[in-house]
Image (cartoon, rainbow, N blue to C red):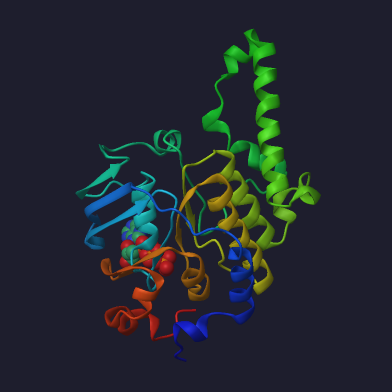
């Protein structure tokens, strides 16, 4: 089956996003936060990313799209330090970044969610979101023994922040439920909550709508737009649902077989012949 971008967009979903955007002033896009310069990443004989450059700017919602195996997840893993490219440079806030461990990158204010939900299934929503604050916790195990009062004060502060996220994501009713018992859409929302708990400046979302029904997608769109708007969080996301991408992204970078074939606003991408030929003109469900 073939279909165009417009056909791929669900009318219901489009409406929900427009409704959310209504009344909100246009986003202010700032300087580049992250610059990927001529990145090449190989796994043995497989070149997952070939000489790709693009940037992510302060305050924007940046989408990375492309067919299966295009190199999107690999790119997200390069951004969050999980993979180290063999070639190219990564610049973060105007400084060249050397190889870093993921926890060091988390301390720089970069958080992510995963394509396959990576929550602690036996733990409650509340505890899972609390784990997102680990990198912000100052008091270690030993000092907790000596500085009981300080550790307690810190715990209260973290709990308050987590409760605010629970309110924001409208998941009060499941705060004590083990996440393994939750429907898929709610688990995805908890995972977003855990990433938000780290108070990221740059949030990376790997297929946040995958496996969701239309209603769940509407909710997730609303939360992504609200996170960007209310917290000023810069967001980079991989997403297959073209209706979502074209509605919420400020700019879109398109990958195909590890190469960049398009980069621009949703309108520019819709009209880019190379992108249409490689990706948009055919079904990619
Ligand atoms: N850890 C790995 N070891 C070997 N090859 C890998 C590894 N990770 C990815 N690849 C290969 O790199 C290429 C890009 O994969 P990647 O997962 O980044 O694509 P993608 O665009 O995210 O795909 P999808 O939409 O299916 O998730 C593929 O050919 C894949 O098989």
119 over 62 or under it: above or below: above
Q: Nearer the viewer, residue 181 or 56?
A: 56
Q: Is residue 123 visible?
A: no
Residue at left offset 51%, top offset 31%: 135
Q: Quadrant of residue 129?
A: top right
Query: In the image, residue 126 lies at what x, y percent?
Result: 71, 41
Q: Nearer the viewer, residue 224 or 259?
A: 224
Q: Could you tell whether 46 is left or right of 198 in the image? A: left
Residue at left offset 65%, top offset 11%: 145
Query: In the image, residue 212 lies at what x, y percent?
Result: 62, 69
Query: In the image, residue 76 lies at what x, y percent?
Result: 39, 54
Q: Could you tell whether 56 is left or right of 139 in the image? A: left
Residue at left offset 49%, top offset 59%: 26
Residue at left offset 56%, top offset 19%: 140
Q: Is residue 66 visible?
A: yes
Query: In the image, residue 96 lies at what x, y percent?
Result: 24, 39
Q: Residue furthest right?
A: 173
Q: Nearer the viewer, residue 245 or 101?
A: 245
Q: Residue furthest bottom?
A: 1
222 over 257 or under it: above or below: above
Q: How many marks?
A: 0
Tell which quarter ligand 1 is in: bottom left
Q: Could you tell whether 210 is left or right of 184 in the image? A: left
Q: Residue furthest top?
A: 146
């Amino acid at each position: 089956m073939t279909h165009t971008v417009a056909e791929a967009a669900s009318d219901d979903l489009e409406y929900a996003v427009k409704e959310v955007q209504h009344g909100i002033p246009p986003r202010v896009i700032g300087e580049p936060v992250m610059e990927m310069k001529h990145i090449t990443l190989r796994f043995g004989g497989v070149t997952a990313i070939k000489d790709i450059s693009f940037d992510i700017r302060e305050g924007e919602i940046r989408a990375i799209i492309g067919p299966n195996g295009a190199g999107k997840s690999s790119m997200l893993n390069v951004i969050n330090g999980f993979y180290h490219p063999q070639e190219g440079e990564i610049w973060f806030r105007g400084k060249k970044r050397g190889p870093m461990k993921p926890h060091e990158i988390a301390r720089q204010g970069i958080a992510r969610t995963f394509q396959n939900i990576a929550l602690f299934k036996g733990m409650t929503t509340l505890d899972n979101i609390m784990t997102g604050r680990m990198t912000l916790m100052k008091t270690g195990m030993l000092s907790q023994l000596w500085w009981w009062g300080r550790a307690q004060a810190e715990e209260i502060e973290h709990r308050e922040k987590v409760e605010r996220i629970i309110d924001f994501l409208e998941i009060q009713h499941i705060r004590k439920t083990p996440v393994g018992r939750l429907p898929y859409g709610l688990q995805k929302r908890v995972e977003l909550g855990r990433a938000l708990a780290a108070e990221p400046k740059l949030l990376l979302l790997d297929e946040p709508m995958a496996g969701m029904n239309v209603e769940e997608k509407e909710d997730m769109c609303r939360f992504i737009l609200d996170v960007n708007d209310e917290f000023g969080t810069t967001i980079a996301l991989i997403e297959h649902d073209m209706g979502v991408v074209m509605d919420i992204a400020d700019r879109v970078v398109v990958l195909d077989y590890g190469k960049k074939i398009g980069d621009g606003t949703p309108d520019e991408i819709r009209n880019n012949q190379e992108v249409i030929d490689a990706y948009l003109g055919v079904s990619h469900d």
